[in-house]
Amino acid sequence: MPPVPHRGGPNGANQGPVNFKALDKTTFRRLMSYLFSYKKTLLVVLFCILISSLTSVIGTMFLQIIIDDYIQPLMTQSAPVLTGLMKVIGTMAIIYMAGVVASLFQGIFMARISQGVLKTIRDEMFSHMQTLPIRYFDTHTHGDIMSHYTNDTDTLRQMITQSIPNLFSSGITIIAVFVAMLITSPILTVFVIISIFSMLLFTKFVGGKSATYFVGQQRSLGAMNGYIEEMIQGQKVVKVFCHEEKNKEEFDRRNEELCENATLANIYANILMPIMANLGNLQYVLIAILGGALAIVSGGQLMTLGGIATFLNLSKSFTRPVSQISQQINSVITALAGAQRIFHLLDEESEKDNGYVTLVNAKYTDGGQLVETPEHTGLWAWKHPHEDGTLTYVPLRGDVRFLDVDFAYEEGKTVLHNVSLYAKPGQKIAFVGATGAGKTTITNLINRFYDIADGKIRYDNININKIKKPDLRHSLGIVLQDVNLFTGTVMDNIRYGKLDATDEECIAAAKLANAHDFIMMLPEGYQTVLSGDGSGLSQGQRQLLSIARAAVADPPVMILDEATSSIDTRTESIVQRGMDQLMHGRTAFVIAHRLSTVQNADAIMVLEQGRIIERGSHEDLIAQHGQYYQLYTGAFELE
């Protein structure tokens, strides 16, 4: 059996320690490469941000003109004329309206960019996930993998739609406001710069603290999702063994860890804005005092009433984007932590396939020569190219041989030792032994879910490593103990074994598997929609659909991994008949749970700790009075 999944530490996360340099630079650059695929749209967004920011600053600058050039002079007139003032106010309204329109288009285009980027990332993740070896799924919790598609991508959405535009807008605003402040009052601008520098030091300290906990929050969240997913799937087992309290303890521990990371992250994030806001208010008061003093001392030469009002608004406009940048840094850090987890998945090494022998349709010419044909003839052959440029076509017969095979899931921990066996076309080979003896491992090697460390496996006299994995697996049919059914009709689930199968082929496969009768009793027959992994069906019915799925593929080699171990004796006889019909004329490898199901096998292999200790027919092994005899007689006594 495969090794127990490694949870990667006490929080269950599978990623290693966070590299903050990589998090800040490499991850950010890689993430930006997705955005740069929308260069033209980004330029439009930047233009909209520029217009929106500049209109805000220009509108503020009009305040000084209104006060100094219109309001103050009008206050001294006995019959004030408001025409000029109304024109200026109208001009301000037009400027602000342009900013509103620019902000509207900015939101629309950023939504399109963000959803496009997320779609691309999800597509890449799912496509890459299909290329990963079985080993990856054996060593990572499904809930943590799911968290990449949900929590991690959602943090990216927030960053792209909110944080990045706000950062650009804040940056442009700061530059524009700084220039406007210099024009209005260089003296007060120096004071503002000093106070802003103090704010930035505070922001750096708090931001650094929150970064650590936001990264920890994302990892704890992934681990939590993995644990919840496991508990949901195993809820029946939990109930049977009264494991609720222990599970609650473990959940509380993980939840406490997540709560601690999230609390500390949000404490630092939440104290940032109020403190920054109050520092801004303090700066506002000090500017008012200094501006008033400058106006009084200089007699209005260094500062006017309109200049004070304008500068006060500009200082608010300068402090606000600095505070926004401080706030958005937390969102960016969280998103980068999510992006790093996503890139961990994308960087996982794909399943290697150096095979070059392919499976093709074939036919015999009048001269008896086997050749390739585009037509579906029902005859398959291995297309074997050689180094000298010649091609050899070997008929697919189902001859499988193990020659001195050693294998280890982890280096230094050998699971199979010097295993040799052969299965001639049409033979039924059974594996018997205790749990962990290596039965399932042998079948995993036949379909190359894992590759051997030493020795050879030959399929129709071709080294299995030379055969392309998809072609190899097309020639194999597998019926597992744990049946996976998918949301869709019964017909769709059977057709999963052969996507181009006709309805007639699917029905014929169901009849072969003894599944037709119960399917016709379902509400809509073959069009009955299954959901929740076929939860409305019995275990035996689900297993019959699994056999039908394998039958429709019509492979020459069948692997049956304890397919009847979890069903009752009466249902087993029905399923067994379906399996017998499925195995007829095919090479079959059967992992036996009940020895009564393998008595008619051509050869039975008894395994112990990764070694074949006995082999032979049922009668031969009984006559030897070895371990098989002890297992068989023990089973008889139990029955």
Image (cartoon, rainbow, N blue to C red):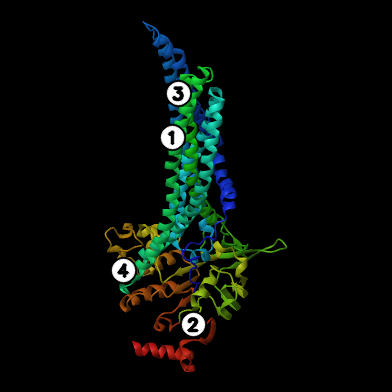
The residue closer to the viewer here, 218 or 609, is: 218
Secondary element at image label 4: loop
Identify residue type, mark 4.
Ser
Question: Residue 314, percent across and down?
Answer: 48, 28
Which residue is tagged 3? 309
Task: Compare marks 1 and 3 and give the one earlier in the sequence.
Answer: 1
What distance separates the C-alpha of mark 3 from that of mark 2? 98 Å
Q: Which residue is mark 2?
A: 602
Measured as percent of width and height from the top left, residue 61 is found at 49, 22
Which residue is the site of mark 4?
538
Residue 139 visible in the displayed image: yes
- Numbered tag placed on residue 257 in the rendering: none
Residue depth check, mark 4 versus mark 3: number of the one nearer the observer: 3
Disc 3 element: helix
Q: Is residue 163 left or right of residue 246?
A: right
Distance of mark 4 from mark 1, alpha carbons?
69 Å
Which image quadrant: the C terminus? bottom left
Query: Reading the chain from its start, which is encountered first: label 4 or label 1?
Result: 1
Say whether residue 383 is left or right of residue 387: left
Q: In the figure, 243 relative to 274: above or below?
A: below
**Amino acid type of the residue that numbered disc 2 sits on in the rendered structure:** Asp
The residue carrying mark 1 is 281
Q: Are marks 4 and 2 in contact (CB under 8 Å)?
A: no
Q: Residue at x 61, y 68 (%)?
A: 465
Q: Nearer the viewer, residue 170 or 501?
A: 170
Q: Secondary structure at mark 1?
A: helix
